[in-house]
Structure formats: C-alpha cells, structure tokens
Amino acid sequence: MMESLLIKKDKLAEREGSEKGSSFSGSERETAVGGGKREVFEFFGWVYHLGVNSIGHEYCHLRFLFIRGKYVEMYKRDPHENPGIQPIRRGVIGPSLKIEDLGRRKVNNGEVYVLRFFNRLDETKKGEIACATAGECQKWIEAFDHAKQQADIEISRGGSARNKLNVETEINLEGHRPRVRRYAQKLIRIGQGPEGLLRQSSNLGVRQDGYIAGDTGDAIQAHEWKCVRTINGIRIFEDVANSKVVKGVLVKAAGVLDANADTAFEVILSLERQKRYEWDTFSSDLELVDSFDGHYDVVYGTYEPKYLTRWQCKRDFVFSRQWFRSQDGTYTILQLPVEHKKRPPKSGYRRTKINPSTWEITTLNTPMGTSPEKCLVTQTLEIHTIGWTRWKNQHCTKFEKSIPYALLCQVSGLKEYIEANPSLKIHSSTAVVQSKLCGCSLSNSEFEDQEVKDEFYDALGSASSSSSEDESDGETENKEPKVKLKNVSWAIAGFALKKRSGVDANKDLDQSVSPVDISSSNFRCSARQGISDTDTNCWTSPRSESFMIRGKNYLKDGAKVIAGDPLLRLIGVDWLRMDERIDKIALHPKFLVQSDAAKKLPFILVINLQVPAKPNYSLVTYYAADRPVNKNSLLGKFIDGTDSFRDSRFKLIPSIVEGYWMVKRAVGTKACLLGKAVTCNYLRQDNFLEIDVDIGSSSVARSIMGLVLGYVTSLVVDLAILIEGKEESELPEYILGTVRLNRLRPDEAPYFGD
C-alpha cells in the first residue's frame, strides 16, 4: 500500500550538516539556491485513477502521479525506473483547483479512499483519484495545496509568468466526460494491479523529537478524567468534572498501540468477521446495512449473551458510524444506536441499544529512530450509573458482565491483536508516495513544448481515457512497481502551555489615525445580543482566554499561548434561513454593511457560515476595526491577497462550551484551516471583506453539521477566527474576533428576503 509522502533528505539540509534521519515536509519548504535558480519540491507515488470512459465503463487503474512545482503528470509506469517514458496525462494545477475528500468507497472487492478534484469556478471540470488509506489522501491534499501555492506565487510576480499562467488556467477545455449509465459488471478488477495496495496498511505518522502528543486542542475545556482501573495495560477513566452535566456517567478506555494511526483506524472500521473475532469480544458479527457520503454508514450486529451473562436469548443491534480525519491527522469515529427499515426486529433476537460511543486515534510523536510507530487509541462511552460506582471501587458487581464493560475492553483486545500480528507494525508497503527537493530551476518555458493547456482536475476527468487505453493496461497493471522503502521522521517541536500572549496586535491597525467609536447598539441585525450566559437564542462576545494560539517562538519550540483580546470588535450577528445558500450578503441593502453607520467604519470583516439543511441557514458575523488596516501587516495582506493565500491562512477554532458530549467530540477543539476543509469565496469591496464559507462543499463538514443541528437548541458554542502565522515576523498570532452562540433556535431564524 502506498506510503505517505516519504521525504528524501534534500541537498541543502546535507550542506547544513543535518543529523541522520532529519527530514522536511515537501509541502512546507522551498529554498533559493545560487545562480538565480530555485529548488522545487517534487511529489510522486502510486494512486488509483477512477473514472468512466467514453463507452460508459468504469475503470480503476493504478497510476504513478508526479507533481513538480505547479505541474502534474500521470504515468503508467514509474518514470524513475523507465527513463524516457511519456506521461499519459499532464496539466497545470491552477489556483481555482479544489479538492474534496469523498471518504471510503467500495471498488470491486476492496475499499479505497477517494479524492475529487474540481474547479470551483466550473464544477463540471472534475476528476477522481483514490488511495489505500485516509492518511495517504491527506498527504496528497497537502501536496496539491503546495502546488497551488506555487501557482499563486507566479501570479503574484506578475509579468509574463502571470500572463502565461492565466492562459493555461482560463482555456475552455473540451472532451469533458459526460454522465452516462454505469455498468457495475464492467468494473475493472483491482487485482490487475498490485493487490497489496488494498491489503496492507501504510505507515503514516508524524514524529517529534522527544515529545509525546497528548489529548490537546486549541480551546480549553473543563474535563477531569480520573483513572479508576487498569485492565491488561489499558486505563479506564471517569469524567468526574462533568458528572452532573451528562446523563449517567462518561467513561473512557485509553491505550497505546504499537502501530500507526492509519492501521488502527482500518482495523476498527473493518467488518471482516475473522479479524474481529481476534480482538472484539462483543461486536464481532457485523454486517453493513447502508452507506452514505463515504463517511457514514449503518451496521447491523448480533452477539451471543452467554459470553457476558447467563441469559440465553440472542441479541442484535443496529448502530451508525460516522468518521472523519482532522487536519492534524487524528481520526474520530462516532457510534450511535439507530433504527433502520432494512433491519426491523428479528424473530428469536432481542433488540438491544448499544451505548453511544466514540473512538479517537492519535499518532504519538516519538523520538527519531524509534520503531515501531505508536498511536493512542481512546474509546469514550456514555453508560448508566447502576453498578458503575461499586465496580470502580473494586467491589464485585454485575458490571463486568455488561455490554459497557465489553465495549471498554475493545481497546485492550485491539492492543493484544496488534501485538500478535507483527505484520501490522512493520514499515512495509507495496507502493509509496515520496517528495523531494530538486535543485533545478522550474519555469514555464520548460513545459511549452509539452503543450500544457489543461488544469489537473480536467486532465484526470477527460474522456480521452477511451476503451483503447483501458484495454492496453493489462501489461502495465500486472507489473508491480519496484519501490525502495525508507523510514520517515520529522523533527517537530512539542506542545507547551505558556502565559497569555503579550502580542501587540494593534500594529496591524494604523495608530496614527484616531479611533472611531464603535458600539453594537448602532447596528441592527436579526440575531439578538444576549445580556447574560443564561439567555437563549442570542449571541454574546466572549473573551479570548479559552483559546490557544501560536506563541512568539512557535517555530522553534512549538509552544502555544493563551490568546489576548480580539483585534476586531463584534458588532452584530445575523441568523437567517433561506431556500438556497446566499453569497455576497454584504451587498444586500437591508443588511448591516450597507447601513450609514457601517459605511463610516474603517474596515468590516464579514464571516458568512453557510449551513446546509432543509431549509439552509446562514450565520453571519460582523467584525469592525476602529482604525484603518495597515497595508503591509498580515491582516492587510490577507484582506487584499489572493484567494489561495487566504485559503492557506484563514483559521477557525471551535469550542462547545455546553452541550451533548458526543457533539463536543465531533466538533473538537482544534484549529481548522477553513480554506482547506471547505470552499471559501471572498468578496473584497469598499471598506469590507466578506468570506462565504460553504460548509456543504465537504461531505465531512455536512455530516458534522447535521449532528450539530440536531442538538443546536441546547448548545453554547464559542468560535474564534484568526490568520495563521507561518513566519517568525507573523508570530505570536492574535485572535481577530470571537462569538458565543447561546442555544440558537433554527425555527425562529427570520426568512431571508422578508
């Protein structure tokens, strides 16, 4: 299976005398060298190309993908081992390229993870590739993001380079594959390529030198986990801080596994009976009932209660699983009991509702050279209080014969299963993705003779993949790629908490200009400003002490600090419902930005969070500056920068202050680069910048938002927005603005247009 972006040591690092084993992420570094040439990263490796050819047959071909700078090529064979081989597809990765993680998809007899490429200006131009694990998908997303940045840099330089890129990206491509009837029986077998790609786990994991990552986030939450018992090396905890908030008791089991997060995730998600028999004492007989969006499915299971109790009546259950991978590589799986029309109560079985639970799988960062990789697996579940108190105090109770106890023991079984299967821990792979830094210059002229006219998304989605190409793949697909494997290690600084940030964020505002008076009472919006935290269906403006941001020395020590006061002031919130999502809401004459009071403000930042539902909703927040923004500041560059720059910097930190624990787990507390997670559209005019965040553009975001909307009337949510600091001069970070949403009522949101 494809290894994740294994990094070759670059020549510059060798000249600097770096220690053996050090490496750099290809998506983060580009170095200038002598002679006016610049070193350009290359990303390459094996992927699956999915599509439908001109006669309506689905195909799934193993292809070698090669990214160099902002250019991409696709080969049938590895060009490193076959010099002179010509690519079958080539194209430019334009700034308008968007990538969507479609999750798992069953292709013939295997499960793959699919990435969809499309032009956000024209979604008919699209294509799909697939990887063997979710971790590999994430690394390819990072590689394409880096390539987009290369295109953005060329645009910013202007001149002939900019004109050349504009010509390349603006061409109206022909030969787009039409939507045709698909013939399932005509699927090309995965087995024609290296079968190991579907059967082996890759070794994805980011290591840190001497640091172990804990259960941390970018928002501070009140949890007090007390260890009450250890079972076979697994710790069992009780959340004593929220015992009065949660109905019943919130407990979790946590253990360290000698495998990477990808491996643990695949084992937990697998429904293969024989494998589950080896580690799952409870839910080993499972059957897939339904699947949605690649990130959500429904599972039916049966079990013999004789293994737990003296009861002889057979039991069955139905539950849903929803999973996603955060931008830091942590996997989360949510499991809830559900009902499904395909699985009504069964004769001879007693229907049981299993406990709501979550899995979290986090890569542990170990010292360089440590093998095997490790991950922390945590299973959290909600249980009734009966029997729990006596059991945790080591008294004999019936709890050890209960379903919750069997669920808590799953982590222990998983740990022992991986220990008993060394193949799950070996750094091996059939195919590999690598990146390296090449010292040669890269210019547009190099590609002129290749007639590069297509953007990458359309190069993959082109109908040029005809039946003749499909039929010619037999020789290629049977040839296994020969790949040399290398270990990966990153030297990344650890996480630490420090005192509150002392940054003077006001340097982003022109201090030579007298501030204007800003009062939210001067502005009218549809949502009501709350007076106290007990108010409902309203908003307030919380302070920033509950958020963590990158400190001054983050690039050296990885330390985060408590945020200071927001730079901008929250002056209003609109909570609206509508039939279809609305962009450019700031231009509407009835809304805040077009009021006389708003036109007198130096600058307004408008965040339009577009919530997909029936009907759709928009949460619009307005933040104002009391002075003009310095053009050369980070905020100034963000306001007047390119969309690619904005996508790579715009961050949101969420925090569920009050609400159902499952929703808290789903939303999390870690900062998210919104431009990479969902589609963001920008409108810069007059004295404002509007950011329209299309949550519905991501199947993962849609799924999470669906869960949130189900509990929104009981949630207190804090949101903080900021611009990510990547250079030393941009640190420490600072919060642009915050908002607290107190138990919003969707049915009371005014209809847009009334």
Image (spheres, rainbow, N blue to C red):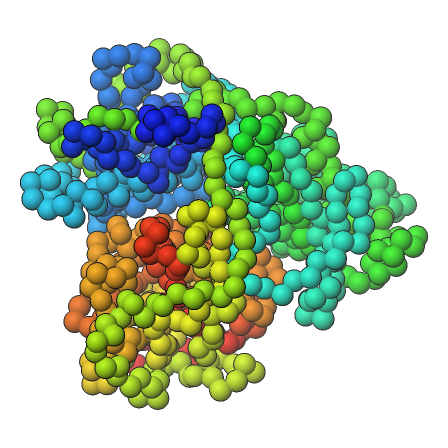
- What residue appears at the point 36 percent right and 68 percent down from the top-left corner? 504
Question: Is residue 78 placed above or below 256 in the rendered structure?
Answer: above
Question: Is residue 273 placed above or below 741 in the rendered structure?
Answer: above
511 sits left or right of 616 in the view:
left
40 sits left or right of 257 in the view:
left
Q: Position of residue 198 (x, y in %)?
A: 50, 26
State the residue in front, 22 or 475.
Answer: 22
743 sits left or right of 622 in the view:
right
- What residue appears at the point 37 percent right and 57 percent down from the top-left corner? 731
* Residue positioned most to the bottom: 521
Dividing the image into 4 quarters, which one contains the C terminus? bottom left
- What residue appears at the point 29 percent right and 17 percent down from the top-left corner? 79
State the residue in front, 447 or 9.
Answer: 9
- What residue appears at the point 39 percent right and 65 percent down from the top-left corner? 503
Q: Position of residue 213 (x, y in %)?
A: 57, 46
Q: Position of residue 464 (x, y in %)?
A: 22, 27
State the residue in front, 740 or 702.
Answer: 740
Q: Position of residue 222 (x, y in %)?
A: 63, 65
